[in-house]
Image: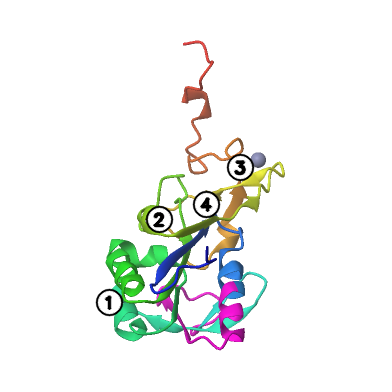
């Protein structure tokens, strides 16, 4: 048995909540590919403006050069035929990235995607759920709950805003575990109205 598929491409998903080290894990894998003299091309959506325009940068400031692209189709146009293709912050491309990632893998590329699997309400956040289903390899990273120290898989928003993602505003979030996570925005907390299993009704 081989550690990785032979004679075909494949898909690797790196997901988790904010502060779970997704981009660091992506960078770690890409650096190893570069050591092996593999051709690597990295993409990120234009919307992600934190730290640097044309690099992917982890919270611990590791960085690699990236192509900043507008649309999912650009990833196919510039990534087709490349041995190792990586897409960071994949949630910003929406569902259109799924056929691109599949086509790249079908045509022989190793495709790595990193992104959030849940939004700030704890709802599944496409396209990661679909990519997790079609990927050969899925890594779900955990952060540490900033309230209690449990493993955390949710991104708690601390400010009351309607957008699904607040770009570059990491100070507006905390990593939280299931117990400490509250999907209601500050000012709308209705915990007393929420039914919990075991409550008498
Ligand atoms: Zn907690």
Depth check, front residue: 110 or 93: 110
> Where residue 35 sits in the image (x, y, percent)?
62, 85
Q: Which residue is mark 3?
A: 177
Q: Which residues fall within the magenta stretch?
A: 29-54
Residue at 43 percent across and 72 percent down: it is 111
Disc on the earlier residue, 1 or 3: 1
Any atom of ligand 1 within 8 Å of the CB at mark 3? Answer: yes
Image-quadrant location for residue 20: bottom right
> Where residue 18 sits in the image (x, y, percent)?
56, 57
Nearer mark to the viewer, of 2 and 1: 1
Instruction: Point out the quarter of the image occupied by ligand 1.
Output: top right
Q: Element under label 4?
A: loop
Crowding around mark 4 (Cα neighbors within 10 Å: few <14, some 14 to 19, many 20+) is: few
Measure the alpha-carbon separation of dots 3 and 4.
Answer: 18 Å
Nearer mark to the viewer, of 1 and 3: 1
Residue at 52 percent across and 29 percent down: it is 191
Q: Which residue is mark 1?
A: 73
Disc on the earlier residue, 2 or 1: 1
> Where residue 67 sits in the image (x, y, percent)?
43, 84
**Numbered label attached to residue 159:** 4
Crowding around mark 2 (Cα neighbors within 10 Å: few <14, some 14 to 19, many 20+) is: few
* Residue 166 appears in the picture as rendered: no
Residue at 27 percent across and 66 percent down: it is 99
Measure the alpha-carbon separation of dots 4 and 2.
Answer: 12 Å
> Where residue 149 sits in the image (x, y, percent)?
72, 44
Q: Which residue is mark 2?
A: 164
Crowding around mark 1 (Cα neighbors within 10 Å: few <14, some 14 to 19, many 20+) is: some
Q: Element under label 2?
A: loop
Disc on the earlier residue, 3 or 4: 4
């Amino acid at each position: 048995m081989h550690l990785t598929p032979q004679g075909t491409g494949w898909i690797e998903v790196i997901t988790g909540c904010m502060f779970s080290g997704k981009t660091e894990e992506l960078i770690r894998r890409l650096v190893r590919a570069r050591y092996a003299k593999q051709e690597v091309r990295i993409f990120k959506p234009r919307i992600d403006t934190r730290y640097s325009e044309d690099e992917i940068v982890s919270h611990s400031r590791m960085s690699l050069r990236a192509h900043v692209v507008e649309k999912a189709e650009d990833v196919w146009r510039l990534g087709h035929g490349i041995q190792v293709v990586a897409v960071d912050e994949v949630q910003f491309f929406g569902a259109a990235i799924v056929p691109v990632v599949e086509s790249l893998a079908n045509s022989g590329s190793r495709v790595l995607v990193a992104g959030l699997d849940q939004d700030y309400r704890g709802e599944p956040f496409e396209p990661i759920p679909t990519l997790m289903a079609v990927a050969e390899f899925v890594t779900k990273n955990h952060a540490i709950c900033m309230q209690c120290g449990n493993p955390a898989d949710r991104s708690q928003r601390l400010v009351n805003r309607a957008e699904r993602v607040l770009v570059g505003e990491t100070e507006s979030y905390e990593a939280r575990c299931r117990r400490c996570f509250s999907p209601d925005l500050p000012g709308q907390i209705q915990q007393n109205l929420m039914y919990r299993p075991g409550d008498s009704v």
